[in-house]
Image (cartoon, rainbow, N blue to C red):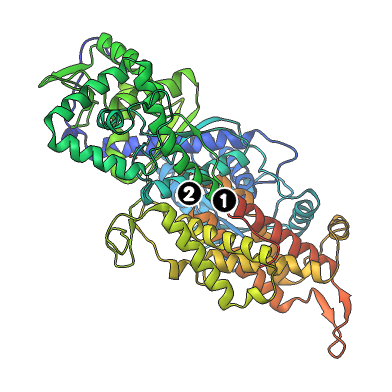
Amino acid sequence: MLKSGGVVQHDPEDASEVEKLVAENGKLNYRINIMKRTASKSDPNGMVNILGKLEELFDSAIKKAFPDIKDFQVVVVSTTPNFGDYQFNGAMSLSKLLKTLGKSLNPREVAAAVQKCVPPNEVIETLDLAGPGFINIKLKASFVQEQLSLLVTRGIRPPCGVEKKRVMVDFSSPNIAKEMHVGHLRSTIIGDSICRLLEFLGHDVLRINHVGDWGTQFGMLLAHLEDRFPNFAEETPPIGDLQSFYKESKIRFDSDADFKKRAYACVVKLQSHDPVYIKGWQAICDVSRREFQKIYDRLDIKIKERGESFYQDLMKKTVMLLEEAGVLKEDEGRKVMFAPGIAVPLTIVKSDGGYTYDTSDMAAIRQRVHDEAADWVVYVVDLGQSGHFETIFACAEFAGWLDRKKTRVEHVGFGVVLGEDRKKFKSRSSETVRLVDLLDEGLRRAKEKLIEKERDKVLTPEELESAQQAVAYGCIKYSDLAHNRNGDYVFSFDKMLEDKGNTAVYLLYAYTRIRSIARTANVTDEQIKKAAADGIPLSHEKEMKLAKLLLRFPETIVRLTFDLCLHPLCEFLYEVSTTFTEFYDVCYCVEKDRTTGQIVHINMDRMALCEATANVMAQCFSLLGLKPIQKM
Ligand code: ARG
């Protein structure tokens, strides 16, 4: 909060390591508390978040066993089948905590005490103490059977217990008159998937395209427009190639002093909302907008444009408020704002009186938190801008516009895209890669791949085309999402189009194969649902293993919201498909007569398991923005 008077500056060096850790821990606790709060509200029709449920059970066990311990964050993890299904391994830290309270119990004794206090429930079969104090948890078979049967009869539903939030996701956000580059592609893919996830969880999501559509570059563009298309106010100027238009105007701006002067005059006219110049500005924006839209349509991205220009009037107000609060400092004619503990300030007003990227983001955060009453604001922008967002958030807090205990704001960053040579991603002519060309190449390569696999011999031309698109756009999205977004990422069509390993091609094939099992056996949806409703025994160990994994879908997606990293969803999806293969290799679903090839027996329970697998996979694809197809 802002104290009266000016900015209190802290030297970052002063903050001791301990303080930093305490702050870090506070943040983690805050996040976990949000999750805890959401877990407590249950929605009777949603899927059960098993891990969440276990954490609740252990939470009450710990409260009962050790009433003196407050605010202990229970964490349960899933584990390998040798140890059970899940594991509680908090006994060590509990034992340390107890020591600080003057109670001496070793972790094994702590674990034993917790184990005794777990309330009766329908989820857990056994709790086993192991090693120095682990508790291995095995799920009840009847619970797994029942949940799996619900999964098939009801279909995939959002997990229960998620508290609805109003979330604004700022993503994609290219700049007008400039080409959308691979960085914007990453933001578009990651941002869209985050929105899909949050929408599925039931949040109220606003997808915002914060396009760079305001600023001094419009001066030179408008001055050039005056010369090239003098009657632009009456007739829409046929600009055609905005890239070269931009380059031409830039050359003139850099070399012609008169032109430069006129460019400045144009900015002034635009900013004073002269209708003629507004028209010209709109015409220029429209050309870019149409280009961006082509990309969004191809990738099936929905987004609402609310660019920097949207905040024009708010920027004035922003500056006024900051001025009144006394937090702006003069610096060589500029007005800057420092945040506590951050060395580099924001530039709020330039020396010529103009506003900056910083000003628009200060206006935007205030608008989002204040006017839109967002509970959660997400910025999907490359990691190069971490400093910018850190400062924006800190300044907004300092100005008293943002309380991070109430509003979750976060920068979801991502690394740069590299070529296969591990250098900056460039095209052969060493220019930056145009996104349209990239998508076209994806289509071309996908077709090659399909023909190589002789799919053109079995698919109709229409089927082949949808397969081509699903593979091309699917592999571009998937290879981006499957990598930890915090790292740099090497763009390689060869890698992403491989049909083995954790790739879109492998997964899309696996999915169509599973779907075709029921189709070729002529089994209907109704028959499968009926079989599931009658109960699925899961008597084979591989059936049980697959079922338990499928039931981890809700906890997996809830956990994604902790840090908005999406690669664990890809790992889960891949694990589902390999675990399915393990099951399918040893468990017959459809038995055929060896000589005639006629179907002699259909195991309907296993058909239900196939159906459940395909449904889970389809939902994962949908969250990742991939379009699975029936035939491939
Ligand atoms: N247009 C900016 C760029 O290309 C990204 C904007 C991100 N959003 C924001 N609120 N700053 O770098």
Q: Can you tell me which quadrant of the image ligand 1 is in? A: top left
In the image: residue 391, left or right of residue 458: left
Q: Please report the residue visible at 77 percent of the width from the left and 58 percent of the height from the top.
A: 145
Q: CA distance from mark 1 to mark 2?
A: 8 Å
Query: Badge 1: how crowded within 10 Å, few (<14), some, or many (20+)?
Result: many
Residue identifier under label 2:
189
Q: Nearer the viewer, residue 352 or 531?
A: 352
The disc label shown at residue 590, or none: none
Q: Ligand 1 within 8 A of label 2's CB?
A: no
Residue identifier under label 1:
625
Helix, strand or loop at label 2? It is: helix
Q: Nearer the viewer, residue 622 or 463?
A: 463
Q: Ligand 1 within 8 A of label 1's CB?
A: no
Q: State the count of labels.
A: 2
Looking at this view, name the residue that lies furthest to the bottom: 595
Query: Badge 2: how crowded within 10 Å, few (<14), some, or many (20+)?
Result: many
Residue 195 is at least partly visible in this image:
yes
Work out whether mark 1 precedes mark 2 in sequence or the reverse, and give the earlier one: 2
Q: Nearer the viewer, residue 156 or 307?
A: 307
> Picture coordinates of residue 571 (x, y %)?
53, 60
**Amino acid identity at mark 2:** Ile
Circles 1 and 2: CB atoms closer than 8 Å: yes
Q: Please report the residue visible at 68 percent of the width from the left and 66 percent of the height from the top.
A: 512
**Amino acid identity at mark 1:** Gly
Residue 88 is at least partly visible in this image:
no
Q: Please report the residue visible at 79 percent of the width from the left and 62 percent of the height from the top.
A: 608
> Picture coordinates of residue 142 (x, y %)?
78, 57
In the image: residue 224, left or right of residue 400: left
